[in-house]
Amino acid sequence: MTDLSISRVPLQPIWLEVDQFIRSYYAATPEAQTGILPLEIDWNFFLSIEKANGLCLFTARAEVAASPLLGLSLYFLIHHPQHKGRLVAICNTLAVAVPHRGQGIATSLVKTALQYFQSSTSVQMVTHGHRAVYQAKPLFPALGFHKEEETYIILLPRKDLPSCQ
């Protein structure tokens, strides 16, 4: 894709647009909800983390006025409890709209985030997950990431809470 604009932006002014984008992403990507809890975004949580300087949002748009979101990456910034004093960026969401996948947008989002963390923060480690349900090859090794661990999930049946199924 040519004329792509990747920017670090605050979540608060665009959270409704981000909500709509993520809901659309999940609707268009059936495997996105395979094996996990139902999508119920707590935007108050995200906005409170942002107020405490613990959130970084990067958006991808075409370089056209009022262009819709083509993709986004959202990171939590935390001081790692096992590595005292070390700031870590943990990717919560990396998503590209279905019609724009395969055009390098996710790679551009991650590269921009890495450049920002390197030049403008004290972040020392960035983590990204790759869901096993996706058929796409992970882009992270080509960007210098190494595989550190695998995650296993089990949904526990609960009679006292809404169904996870």
Image (spheres, helix red, strand yellow):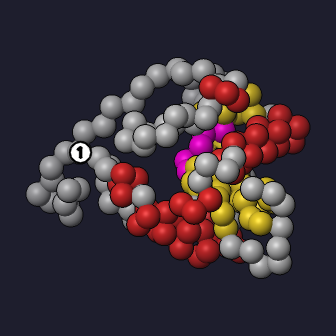
Q: Which residue is mark 1?
A: 155
Q: Nearer the viewer, residue 54 or 72?
A: 72
Rendered image quadrant of residue 38: bottom left
Left or right of 117? Residue 70 is left
* Residue at 67% across, 27% down: 142
In percent of width and height, residue 106 lies at: 65, 47
Q: Residue 162: where, in percent of width, then height?
A: 21, 63
Task: Give, as a single range, the part of the protein colored magenta.
Answer: 89-93
- Residue at 15% x, 49% y: name it: 157
x, y percent for residue 61 = 74, 65
Snapshot quadrant of residue 155: top left
| SS assignment for the magenta stretch, majority | strand
> Residue furthest toward the bottom?
66
Residue at disc 1, secondary structure? loop
Left/right placement of residue 60 relative to residue 43 reads right
Relative to 145, does residue 29 appear above or below in the rendering? below
Residue at image point 67% right, 67% down: 69
- For the view shown, which residue lies furthest in the right direction? 119
Q: Quadrant of the N terminus?
A: bottom right
Does 5 appear in magenta?
Answer: no
Say above or below: 138 vs 37.
above
The amino acid type, in three-letter code, at marker 1 is Leu
